[in-house]
Image (spheres, rainbow, N blue to C red):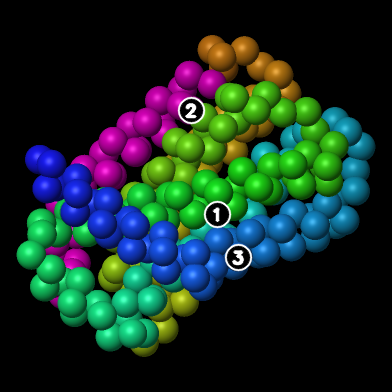
Amino acid sequence: MKDYFAGIMAVLWKDVLSELRTKDILLSVFVFALLSLVIFSFALRTDRATVAIIAPGVLWAAFSFSGVLALNRAFATEREKGSLEGLVITPVPRDVIYFGKMLGVLLFMLAAEIMLLPVFVVLFNVALDVPRLLLIIFLATLGFASVGTVFSAIAVNTRSREIMLPVLFLPVVVPVIISAVEASARVMTGDPWDSLTVWLQVLVAFDVIFVVVSSLVFEYVLEE
């Protein structure tokens, strides 16, 4: 078991070191989401009541589409440097590679999303219950990364991975995005915890199911 977790941390640490050198994922996610929020803030100049309605959708549209950029880069470095085959023949269980890559994507996305929250507050002038919103962001991003890592591994070997990834991935992750928007809307309007229960349950169920399923099918994805 110790070797299992050591393998996961080795894959994660490799991705972290690579990202610290290039900043490909974090920078692309942050810049794309930032530009999306700025554009939406100028395009949707409405009264405070209307902003409270549209702001959750704007936030998660920015997070979702910028997250696709992060997933596009998840296996791109190995592919470009010709080291993908080396990763495949590494003498560790395939789910070790999956969890290491998934945690890397999760870490980079969460870092960019947390940095964007103050910008979102300033642009849309909304009050946030930060602890509850961070819980929603973590659960939704975990679901996003768990499924996206598998589809990123599928798309990396295709000729047009930038197109194939969102086409294959976004329909599957729709329940996560809808649940995140609905839960965030209730947080931004100051609703009690009870109003979040259903949406949080959906997020947790999605995370549990797809983390397990994705780790099981990842072996066959790599072999293809």
Query: Which badge, 2 or 3, comes first in the chain's sequence?
Result: 3
Rendering quarter of residue 175: top left
Front tag of 2 and 3? 3
Q: Residue at x 32, y 77 (%)?
A: 78
The answer to whether residue 152 of the structure is visible from this angle is: yes
Which of the marked residues, 3 or 1, is nearer the chain's N terminus? Answer: 3
Identify which amino acid the numbered label 3 is placed on: Leu
In the image, which residues are magenta?
196-224
Q: Residue at x 45, y 36 (%)?
A: 139
Q: Nearer the viewer, mark 3 or mark 1?
A: 3
Question: Where the N terminus falls, by quadrant?
Answer: top left
- Pick the front one: 5 or 136: 5
Residue kind at label 1, given as amino acid type: Ser
Type of the residue with mark 2: Trp
Residue at the spot of label 2:
199
For the residue labelled by badge 1, is the local secondary structure a helix, a strand or a loop?
Answer: helix
Up the image or down, 30 lies above or below 153; here it is above
Give the structural element (helix, strand or loop) at label 3: helix
Q: Main secondary structure of the magenta part?
A: helix
Mark 3 → mark 1, Cα distance in angstroms = 15 Å
Crowd rating for badge 1 (residues with CA inside 10 Å; few <14, some 14–19, many 20+): many
Q: Which mark is residue 27?
A: 3
- Vertical placement of residue 215 versus 85, above or below: above
Q: Which mark is residue 64?
A: 1
Q: CA distance from mark 1 to mark 2?
A: 17 Å
Q: Examine the structure image and report whether residue 141 is included in the region drawn in magenta.
A: no
